[in-house]
Amino acid sequence: MKVALSGLDKLVKEGKILEAFDTYFTDGVVTYDEAGNKTTSKAEKRALLEGFFNEFTRAEEISLFDSFIDGDTSYSSFRFIFSKNSGEKFQWDEVIIRKWKDNLVVSEFYSNQDYAELKKSLVKDEPKKKAAAPKKAAAPAAEKKAAAPKAEKAAPKAEKAPKAETAPKAKAATVKKAAAPKAAAKAK
């Protein structure tokens, strides 16, 4: 699943969203968002995506900040900036939560949750798992003194995914924020 998630997110980041959808989603995929928009098949979702790309014709920026896997579910944090033919720009950040089966997406949920908090809440049990691992035998005192400092002390702290409010001021003046593109792509 890790390879499939990486491939899917890479295509999305490159703006090849339809290709990613065609490659990594099952025919019966269910997609939904916090606003209550929902599709129940690949054909239905693809039609919405095509409608979206007819209206939002240019991907100005697609940033993947982070992704992780928890069981059969993946979480990817993205920022999207799309523009219409008129030049009007829309920006939104979202967490895409996907359920997988046999390396294909069976459901996808679009959320405006805080990614860092979501990740922290889901991986809070990690230290317990590490603590349960067998411990190595203690090194003699002379070897302990000669040991190199721990890598984690020297490594920089991981950065949180930036929030939409941290976008540069000049860009923010020309960019409209959108909750998510799904509302614009509702079936008529």
Image (cartoon, rainbow, N blue to C red):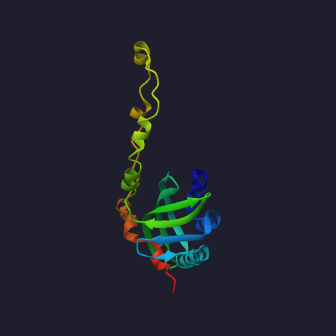
Q: Nearer the viewer, residue 167 or 152?
A: 152
Residue at screen point 65% across, 64% down: 23
Residue at screen point 50% across, 57% down: 73
Place residue 175 in its image quadrant.
bottom left
Residue 169 appearing in the image: yes
Q: Nearer the viewer, residue 55 or 71?
A: 71
Residue 50 at x, y percent in the picture: 58, 77
Residue 3 at x, y percent in the picture: 60, 51
Q: Along the horizontal axis of the image, is 131 left or right of 99?
A: left
Q: Residue furthest top?
A: 142
Vertical arrangement, residue 6 with respect to residue 30, above or below: above
Vertical arrangement, residue 174 with respect to residue 114, above or below: below
Residue at screen point 57% across, 51% down: 2
Q: Nearer the viewer, residue 141 or 86?
A: 141
Vertical arrangement, residue 146 with respect to residue 92, above or below: above
Residue 167 at x, y percent in the picture: 38, 61
Residue 87 appearing in the image: no
Residue 35 at x, y percent in the picture: 41, 75
